[in-house]
């Protein structure tokens, strides 16, 4: 289908270009022209479905670079607890009772929530099973995503099999919507030897199923809490004295295709290594606060030129998938923590949620900005709202005032997946029913297994 | 009008009582019964307009205890600047070009935004002028509020006149919706002598226009930034060595009717004085972060038993009036800052936004919880949303997952002021037009005056 978005204010996220009374022409999956409406409407007349964006602002779709999509089923199950108790007494026991179908349902719920809040790409880490999985849910919803399989030392064989199947079945599939990743859980749950093995696995999968332009990336929790070195020392009886990035670098696993989630407890040397190895960061401020992990040194990373993107983390440590919330909190948090209101300004935060997110997933050739030749992943935000009135500055409103529910239209890969706040790919009522039913099943199995 | 809300889950905010399949009966302005729907629907049949709350959660309306409602007109005008530059080069020069009518329009815009985001009471500090003002806007919108006049050393005579008129015209007016307050701007802009005079003024106004049960309170910025003692020393050539609350206590102005906004830079002794004098705090986390002021020691105040309520501050240092955002950030921020995920749990934060807010405004006899005899200030929140699915715990969802746009019905003083997200008291389109026009006028006057 060909589309012509017209009469909107287009925030391109390329060279600070903002086009008032702007238009975007889309053929099939791709943006073929961007400019003033008066020019484009002459060039793209018949054969283009018109999307009116009068009074609205068009931006690239938001990119959520750290999620565990299936965990939406555990949203609000347990909060306000010490981290270890939360994991050991609540999350891990209940997760054991989630079936492959539950994982699919949870990811479907997150897909809807993501689309409805203006997110067009999600990087998710969870357990892969061939028949029912997160990739299937994303593809069904028309959501773009990097879908990973999370690896632990205690299940190496299972992991290798899952990774092979995931790459074979899903890398660069669903019209290019889905890519896959190798996801070592964390430096304290993946032993040094296995970490190195997984590096080789990633290389092998890349040469079999991927290309330099469409790579299989590496997605891992890194330095989420300050006791991570201690955890590594305990788990692997090492004499670790360095920072976590320094440790990972000593294993030779860091590269430009590595995205590190959280990055809270980094040393200055860790940041220097990230810069040198071109490691990307996913900043997850809501989760880091909620779990009491602390505040990531984002201003330092940005100053050093490290790519910092944004993620919500799982809906049970957030408890939403709302990137507008994450943008606003990112813009606020570091100003207050560093007592400097000039840092992380609105424009930079919007970049973190769009073009920097694309870079973090090694996907910037196709997404992250409104540019000719890129995939049409766009959101149209209704600015005729009391809380967006009056209007001085679109960028300020997008970060500090807009709500995810102001997103009116979502286009992914050239396809309208939400129109006038109604998802077109998925029945909301049905998915909510499925989620509620899945929850009941999980709790029943949990009760049986506890007995 | 009499109303019967039925079939909802009622989060009363009284004794942790949650009623599933609950009902609330309202006669005129007042809640006359609360209980199970099966019981109430037999007692309150004809003569009660039914409001169905199936699949919805009913809570007390949220109470925003620190606002400058008129400043919505400056939302997004200037962000990401050093505090002094922001005030001196941007905010104060443009504010000089706001007319009394602009103040009314800005307050009307904030009233709509507040109602649409589930806030039923707003405590606002701004400049009072008799004909057009914030109180008029609130009354017109049907919003409950405490409306203050902000006092500065440089305009004592003008202030005294304004305070007298404000109290006479508006205290306990509009069916009891509006109360008024005496608002010394801050300890560094109101000299010690004037501070003491204003204390006497408040007492006089109370004896003329108010009662112990419906008091005229005192609303002031306190300890917003750590350089406040230095500002006071400079402004008034004092030898101040104590904390700000200690200083105010030495002037004899602290009492249970004082609400102190911000409370960022407090000493332990300041907190002890707040406890002793029963001073109430309005915590404004979004503004405190955005302006780089820092993080208020909320967990310490709570531990000492100080009443801590929540406020958004003005829409140009936030940039919304959204109390759901403020609740979520409050629940998150202190966990991360103190690296303790158990503090400020969801229930406590919801109390801060409801019953503690009522206490902070000395209004808890009438609002802040769903109780027989209290005014019917209620919000009905639609829980049939993907981001509120599945449901384990209503309180968790209200604080961590719900969005202000999930609020479906708002009732203030027994009157439905929003139904199915449509305000009933005010035409949204018209107010947005008025706001946009007011902005244009302000900018034109600013340009003329700069020449």
Image: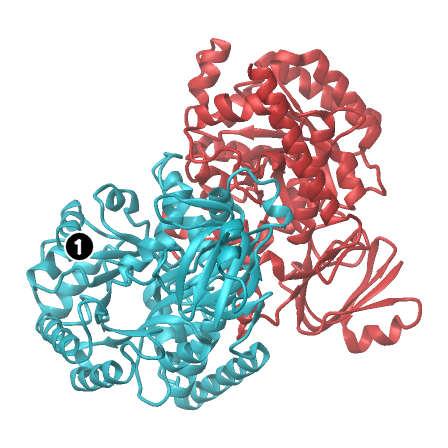
Chain colours: A cyan, B red
User: Relative to residue B209, is residue A202 depicted above or below?
Assistant: below
Circle 1 sits on which residue? A278
Q: Residue furthest top?
A: B237
The percent position of residue A42, horizontal first and vertical second, equals 52, 56
Left or right: B355 in relation to A150: right
Left or right: A294 in relation to A235: right
Report the front residue among A299 and A237.
Answer: A299
The number of numbered badges drawn on the structure is 1
Report the front residue among B81 and B416.
Answer: B81
Q: Residue at x 71, y 38 (%)?
A: B434
Report the front residue among A16 and B296.
Answer: A16
The percent position of residue B278, horizontal first and vertical second, equals 60, 36
Q: Residue at x 38, y 43 (%)?
A: A16
Left or right: B87 in relation to B354: left
The N terminus of chain B sits in image quarter? bottom right
| Element marked by disc 1 | loop
**Residue B397 shows up from this direction:** yes
User: Relative to residue B143, is residue B253 depicted above or below?
Assistant: above
The chain ID associated with circle 1 is A
Q: Residue at x 88, y 70 (%)?
A: B44
Circle 1: is it few (<14), some (14-19), or many (20+) Cα within 10 Å? some
């Amino acid at each position: 289908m060909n589309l012509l978005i017209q009469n909107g204010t287009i925030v391109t996220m390329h060279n600070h270009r903002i086009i008032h009374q702007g238009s975007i022409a889309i053929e099939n999956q791709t943006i073929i022209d961007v400019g003033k409406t008066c020019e484009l409407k002459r060039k793209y007349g018949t054969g283009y479905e018109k999307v009116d964006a009068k009074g609205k602002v068009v931006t690239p779709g938001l990119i959520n670079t750290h999620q565990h999509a299936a965990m939406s089923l555990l949203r609000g199950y347990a909060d306000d607890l010490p981290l270890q108790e939360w994991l050991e007494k609540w999350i891990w026991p209940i997760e054991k009772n989630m079936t492959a179908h539950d994982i699919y349902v949870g990811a479907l719920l997150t897909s809807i929530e993501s689309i409805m809040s203006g997110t067009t790409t999600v990087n998710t880490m969870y357990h892969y099973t061939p028949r029912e999985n997160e990739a299937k849910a994303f593809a069904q919803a028309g959501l773009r995503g990097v879908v990973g399989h999370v690896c632990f030392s205690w299940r190496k064989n299972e992991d290798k099999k899952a990774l092979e199947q995931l790459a074979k079945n899903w890398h660069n599939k669903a019209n290019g919507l889905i890519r896959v990743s190798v996801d070592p859980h964390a430096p304290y749950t993946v032993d040094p030897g296995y970490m190195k093995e997984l590096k080789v696995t990633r290389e092998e999968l890349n040469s079999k199923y991927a290309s330099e332009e469409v790579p299989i990336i590496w997605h891992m929790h890194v330095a989420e809490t300050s006791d991570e070195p201690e955890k590594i020392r305990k788990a692997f009886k090492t004499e670790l004295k360095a920072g976590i990035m320094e440790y990972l670098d000593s294993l030779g696993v860091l590269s430009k295709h590595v995205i590190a989630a959280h990055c809270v407890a980094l040393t200055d040397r860790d940041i220097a290594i990230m810069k040198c190895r071109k490691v990307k960061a996913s900043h997850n401020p809501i989760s880091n606060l909620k779990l009491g992990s602390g505040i990531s040194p984002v201003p330092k990373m940005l100053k050093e030129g490290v790519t910092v993107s944004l993620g919500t983390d799982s809906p049970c440590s957030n408890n939403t998938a709302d990137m507008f919330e994450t943008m606003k909190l990112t813009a606020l948090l570091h100003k207050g923590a560093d007592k400097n209101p000039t840092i992380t300004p609105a424009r930079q935060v919007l970049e973190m949620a769009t073009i920097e997110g694309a870079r973090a997933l090694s996907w910037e050739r196709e997404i992250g900005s409104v540019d000719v030749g890129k995939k049409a992943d766009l959101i149209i935000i209704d600015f005729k709202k009391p809380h967006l009135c009056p209007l001085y500055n679109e960028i300020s409103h997008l970060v500090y005032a807009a709500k995810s529910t102001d997103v009116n239209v979502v286009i992914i890969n050239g396809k309208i997946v939400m129109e006038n706040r109604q998802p077109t790919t998925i029945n909301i009522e049905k998915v909510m029913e499925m989620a509620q039913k899945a929850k009941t099943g999980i709790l029943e199995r949990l009760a049986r297994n506890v007995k």
